[in-house]
């Protein structure tokens, strides 16, 4: 029997490189020969047992690119050798009330890749067809981080020429700045420290605001006020400090996931009719839209690569904010 290598989490924070038997996919599933898998902050739901009832061992990873090498009984529309991706949302059920209304992102029966089933820190994985993304045979493009920021911006209230601020120039933010620029917005990048300004401008920001140098909300108002602020950091205070920089009826869109609550004065929301909302990746077809736009506008993630056997080191580099800006596991 053939085997494949995988990096699994055996208990919270514990990684192990193992050989597993290569099995045929079950009916209704496909098997993917993994080429690469991004390492994301959201992998912490598996690594740190943040999902209730998670079972170990579990292979993390939900930014997967590879080729289908086996197809289970009853699967239609996909073929062996086709290049595909798998994102965070592992596949919608098609029968719940949200699916019946076309809101696949909020499917009540949708598993999370790398948490509810084994993910892409491996040479092979099994996936649900409704969660597959058709990937062009071109260099790596953003899947999870790209979809999150792309969807948030294109579904926002902002129109070309409006001031859109992106908080953070990291794994999510460096893509958000590029998308915002190519969508025609006037872009203000916000981060801590003057040393990040050259990169922000290189990515396409028209303005850079150093949050260490003064009040970033006041700086946004000095630019005319933001229609939308896309918050990509994992720091609650840095998000709430910006609400006063919104225009009336402006919106703070939260893409980062801080561990502490947002503390916002109701007066800032009431007087000015400002709003705060979250954004959660998107569906598989929206992921394909993201990839198509990225190819059209030559938007690329800035990545570091590690081999599979160093996946744990790559995860630690990501979680300690040392990565510039996405860490990607590449199979040998």
Image (spheres, helix red, strand yellow):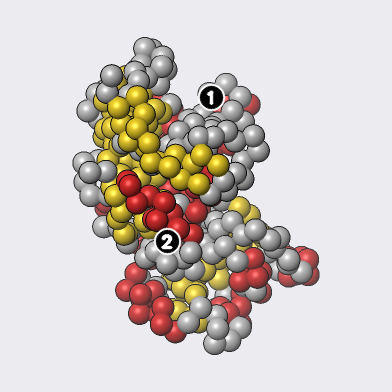
Q: Is residue 228 visible?
A: no
> In the image, is residue 275 above or below residue 106?
below
Residue nearest the observer in this picture, 93 or 29: 29
Identify whether 165 is placed above or below 140: below
Q: Please identify the quadrant where the N terminus is shown.
A: top left
Residue, x 27% and y 52% (percent of image)?
A: 296
Q: Quadrant of residue 4?
A: top left
* Horizontal and vertical percent position of residue 328: 34, 52
- Residue at x 57%, y 62% (from the top left corner): 234
**Which residue corresponds to the image point at 44% horizontal and 84% vertical from the top-left?**
194
- Name the residue tied to disc 2: 317
Residue 304 in view, yes or no = yes
Of marks 2 and 1, the one in the foreground: 2
Relative to the observer, which residue lies in front, 23 or 77?
23
Determine the residue positioned at 68% across, 61% down. 260
> In the displayed structure, would residue 159 be above or below residue 214?
above
Which residue matches tag 1?
Answer: 93
Q: Position of residue 29 (x, y in %)?
A: 40, 21
Instruction: Tell me the crowding category of disc 2: few under 14, some 14 to 19, or many 20 or more residues within 10 angstroms, Cα based.
Output: some
Residue 318 coordinates in the image, percent (x, y): 44, 59
- The answer to whether 31 appears left or right of 316 in the picture is left
Q: Secondary structure at mark 2?
A: helix
| Res 196 quadrant in image | bottom left
């Amino acid at each position: 029997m053939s085997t494949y290598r995988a990096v699994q989490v055996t208990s919270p924070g514990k990684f192990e490189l193992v050989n597993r038997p290569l099995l045929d996919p079950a009916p209704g599933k496909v098997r993917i020969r993994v080429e690469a898998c991004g390492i994301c902050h959201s992998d912490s739901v598996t690594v740190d047992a943040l999902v209730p009832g998670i079972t170990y061992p579990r292979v993390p990873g939900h930014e997967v690119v590879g080729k289908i090498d086996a197809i289970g009984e009853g699967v239609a529309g996909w073929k062996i050798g086709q290049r595909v991706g798998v994102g965070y949302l592992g596949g919608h059920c098609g029968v719940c009330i949200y699916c019946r209304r076309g809101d696949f992102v909020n499917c009540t029966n949708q598993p999370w890749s790398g948490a509810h089933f084994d993910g892409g820190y491996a040479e092979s994985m099994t996936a649900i067809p409704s969660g597959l993304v058709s990937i062009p045979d071109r260099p790596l493009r953003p899947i999870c981080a790209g979809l999150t920021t792309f969807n948030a911006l294109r579904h926002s209230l902002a129109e070309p020429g409006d001031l859109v601020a992106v908080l953070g120039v990291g794994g999510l933010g460096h893509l958000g700045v590029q998308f915002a620029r190519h969508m025609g917005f006037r872009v203000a990048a916000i981060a801590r420290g003057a040393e990040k300004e050259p990169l922000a401008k290189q990515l396409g920001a028209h303005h850079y605001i150093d949050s260490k140098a003064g009040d970033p909300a006041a700086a946004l108002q000095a630019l005319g006020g933001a229609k939308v602020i896309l918050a990509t950091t994992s720091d609650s205070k840095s998000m709430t400090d910006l609400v006063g920089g919104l225009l009336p009826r402006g919106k703070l869109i939260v893409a980062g996931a801080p561990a502490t609550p947002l503390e916002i004065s109701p007066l800032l929301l009431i007087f000015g009719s400002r709003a705060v909302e979250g954004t959660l990746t998107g569906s598989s077809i929206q992921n394909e839209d993201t990839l198509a736009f990225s190819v059209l506008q030559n938007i690329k993630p800035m990545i570091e690569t590690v081999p599979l056997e160093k996946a744990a080191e790559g995860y630690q580099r990501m979680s300690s904010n040392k990565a510039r800006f996405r860490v990607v596991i590449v199979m040998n």
